Amino acid sequence: MIQPAHISVPMLQAPTCHGWRRSFTWILLGLVLLPVVLWFIKRLDDGSDEPLGLLTLGLALILAWRDRHSRHASPGARTCGALVLLGSVLTIGLLPPMFRAALAIAGTGIWLGIHRRPGLLGLLGLALPIVSSLQFYMGYPLRLAAAEGAVGLLKLGGVMVVRNGVNIELGGQLIGVDPACSGILMLWHALAAAMALCAMHRSSWRITLAAGFLAVLLVIPANILRATWLALVESGRCEAFNPGHGNAGLLCFAVVLIPLWWFVSKWPHREIPASPSAAPRVIDQMILLVAGVLALVSFVRPEAAAMAAPSLPPPTNFTFNGLTLPLKPLPASAAELAFASSFPGSLSSHRWGENQVILRRVTKATRMLHPSRDCLRASGFKTTESITVRSSDGCEWSRFSAKRGEIRWVVQERIVSEQNGSAWMDVPTWYWSALRHPLNGPWRAETVISQ
């Protein structure tokens, strides 16, 4: 019996994503992310945030390249990532840009398989310009915690001290826990260190979440220790060892960094075996295509303008440092007119003697009341940190200096309730009070600019 000759038939390979399909997918991803990228670039240049996120973004890209052979995305991950990206586009005009950017980062991470490296996702999240937002929403509670904790420690040491809001009364001096002492920057650096350590050690989700939680817990006592130390220095009780504000912060940050390093490094990482990423399916590309089209539409779709509250006639005189002088209105610039169209209140600029006075009236707690320091930094000024000062008439003001070329300004500002005369030295403190006591409004932000 003649046996048929053995014929070798090559195994059919699963079709892979062709070059044009891969390029098309990357184009769609870029199109979907375009609104977030443009917003990110604008936020980097608006003066409200230090460009710290570029550091974590660069580190995340380096570590993602290191793990490129073990990073893969399953078909389900591709679809899930595409849906999350679609959600980031659908919520344009509904969610704040920061939340939409977070959705875009999560969707991109899932699409590329980075969700298996939670430390990398954490670094990408910290690349967002969140410092000013953290300062706005969490700055006051952290300042309050630092002041209360410092008072408690000083009392344990037998020091007579009283807390007045976010200020510490020690030895006849009023020592303010200013926004720079809130610990927000320390918190950001602690979270960045935790995510970097977890990304380098390829830690699991459980370890990464625990490291982030530990970073938050450690920052609070570390910042209390710094506030206590600086209060003793400012009151003259610790002149023998005065490392300065910056060095004191670095020394206290070691209280956070060393336990974080020990916690993350003591857990052995589990290496994920390398496997090829699944090629995007047609359904995945269709979802990205819909998201890309909607992203393009968002650039031409007119956004509803916020309803501005009815403005009252501007005041005719102003009292500062015990002196009352008439106000002379100044013409509004094009930028001021554009901002006023969506501002929940009214704003006006005046000449007051040799100084300039800017008055902004708001009727509700709003994120749109920006600190003057941020606005000046966006205009190219270099500014000092704000400090709390008391004028000759007993009123407290926040004061800082601004410099651009030959221009030298001293800026003092505060926010005053038109109902009961209560005053706040910074926007975050006022914001929390306005949320709790909305009937104390309207409020007036007063800014005095001197040569």
Image (tube, rainbow, N blue to C red):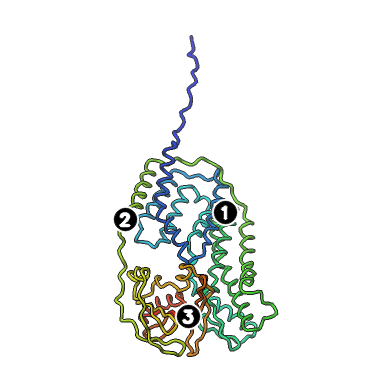
Residue type (three-letter) at the residue carrying disc 1? Ala
Counting residues from the start of the chain, the first of labels 1 and 3 encountered is: 1
Q: 10 Å neighbourhood of mark 2: few (<14), some, or many (≥20)?
A: few
Instruction: Check if mark 1's residue and mark 2's residue have beta carbons within 8 Å.
Output: no
- Point out residue 403 in the picture as x, y percentages from the top left corner: 52, 72
| Observer-nearest of 440 and 381 | 381
| 161 to 384, vertically: above or below | below
Residue 369 is marked as: none
Which residue in the protein does label 3 denote? 450
Q: CA distance from mark 2 to mark 3?
A: 42 Å
Q: 10 Å neighbourhood of mark 3: few (<14), some, or many (≥20)?
A: some
| 22 to 87, vertically: above or below | above
Instruction: Check if mark 2's residue and mark 3's residue have beta carbons within 8 Å.
Output: no
Question: Which structural element holds mark 3?
Answer: strand
Q: CA distance from mark 1 to mark 2?
A: 39 Å
Occupied quadrant, residue 263? bottom right
- Point out residue 10 in the picture as x, y percentages from the top left corner: 48, 24
Residue type (three-letter) at the residue carrying disc 2? Val
Q: CA distance from mark 1 to mark 3?
A: 49 Å
| Residue 182 visible in this rendered orientation of the protein | yes
- What residue sits 41% from the left and 45% below the top? 27
Which residue in the protein does label 2 denote? 300
| Observer-nearest of 65 and 245 | 245
Which residue in the protein does label 1 denote? 199
Residue type (three-letter) at the residue carrying disc 3? Ser
- Point out residue 152 in the picture as x, y percentages from the top left corner: 59, 80
Counting residues from the start of the chain, the first of labels 1 and 2 encountered is: 1
| Observer-nearest of 263 and 179 | 179
Q: How many dots with numbers? A: 3
| 40 to 73, vertically: above or below | below
